[in-house]
Amino acid sequence: MTPIPEELYGDIAATACRPDFADWYSQVRSTGGCAEPIHLYGYSRTIHAATGEILSQREPGRLLVACGNRRKTRCPSCSATYRADTFQLIKAGLLGGKTVPDTVAAHPRVFATLTAPSFGAVHHRTSGPNGSIKPCRPYGSHRCGRIHTPDDPALGQPLDPDSYDYTGAVVWNALATRLWARTVQLANRRAAHLLVVRQRDWNHQGRVSVAKVAEYQARGLVHFHAIFRLDGPEPDAALPDGATVEILEESIRQAAHLASIELPHSPLLAGRGPVTWGDQLDLRPIVAAEHGEGTLSDGQVAGYVAKYATKGAEASGTVDRTIACRSCAGQGHYPDDSGADRYCRRCHGQGTRYQLARLHISDHARRMIQTCWDLGGRPELAGLRLRPWAHMLGFRGHFATKSRRYSTTLTRLRNARRDWQDDRTRHAHGLPPDTTFVRPTARDLEVVDPGEETVMVIGHWAYAGLGHTPGEAAFAASVAADIVESRRIYRQIRAEQAA
């Protein structure tokens, strides 16, 4: 057990002695021990629309709401919820359920990993055919020869930083999402070509549905883990004739080879070729259960994607929050109403929230961030928004995305939890199962038509703060640890019962 620092004892005691500690602690438990909860101030009432009876009410006061951050480094509790939702979303697209037909389990499916090209030699750790670890760069102009441990901080760092192409790496990260979108487009076109279907008829006969998650490599570049599924025009429609896993794999391979994005026009980028994928492309068929080398099961893929979805750029040695001033987007100035540049007082014209030299990051990440900052100050590259996303080393896309027909949505999963809470309210007050819950805003109150079986949840909440004091954070961490342990015990019991 981690010892409590002496300086926290006073704040912990003060928190425990608060007159509203019981109510505050129950709110902390309702947020799952969120590390950075949002503080709202206001009130709410649950009213039966037909009778006017107040079923429940919360008097004016402070309410804690979970932050919902997906990054594990920022909030382990909320990231666990996000990971579980992502697992269900990916699993539904592989096995069906949650509005997705069960027939998708028989569709051709491939798990692909697409990586960035090389921008210079870096320290690495690779294994041989028999599982032995190979020495790092034993030959060539830049040598290492060591066998790195898995936690060696040198992994991913350039052997020769002066010759490493930092400009190319940053620009590749910035354009990676556009390259991904182009790859999906080409995968559909190549699938239609291989199945001898005219391009204009492809949407009426088939479709390649996708879901992907981005992960940072130790060298600071993103790579994508993606699920490709070959469908009919709709997930529950018949597959096009000749649709096989082999056809899908070849479509992905050709799309990854052909996909490219032209660079923005800039003197710094003159003479460079378009942005493309690296040579490493891993394609593995997805099967119902693990069997045979090179295959993955549905559960494995869903677990992999859910795990990657909660990671950020921390694996590459950078920070997990923006370093650019939010008011001026890192520029140090912003246009006023007349269009003239106005000096940003929040960052004193520097554009940064933190001094780069004082950040506890690796030298490689520091140079990547500095490159983002230098390129982001050039007008012709303003569209890449490199300064606001310098902490992500230039990458500014969503970490987890999917095509519309692949599966359900995270919003539907969240609404399912809200519906479960509504069912508890119906049961607690003896309301009929068909009772409808309406949550109107103040603007909607005049147009809401209250029926006999309608419950209105009316409230007014305003932002009042964020986070915990050190003592409150200690209580929240203990709540989060209790929930993690309870879930572990529950899974263990389920596994023993299944066995």
Image (spheres, rainbow, N blue to C red):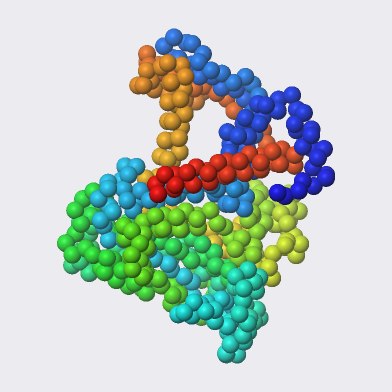
Q: Is residue 353 toward the left or the right of residue 31 in the image?
A: right
Q: Is residue 216 above or below residue 126?
A: above
Q: Residue furthest left?
A: 241
Residue 96 image position (x, y, % from top left): 31, 48
Q: Is residue 195 above or below residue 483?
A: below
Determine the residue positioned at 35% across, 62% down.
290
Q: Is residue 492 visible?
A: yes
Q: Is residue 260 visible?
A: no
Determine the residue positioned at 53% across, 53% down.
310
Q: Is residue 66 above or below residue 421?
A: below
| 193 and 122: which is toward the camera | 122
Q: Is residue 8 above or below residue 359?
A: above
Residue 143 image position (x, y, % from top left): 62, 87
Determine the residue positioned at 61% across, 41% down.
482
Determine the residue positioned at 55% across, 57% down.
311
Q: Residue furthest top?
A: 51
Which image quadrant for residue 43? Answer: top right
Residue 389 image position (x, y, % from top left): 59, 59
Which image quadrant for residue 149? Answer: bottom right
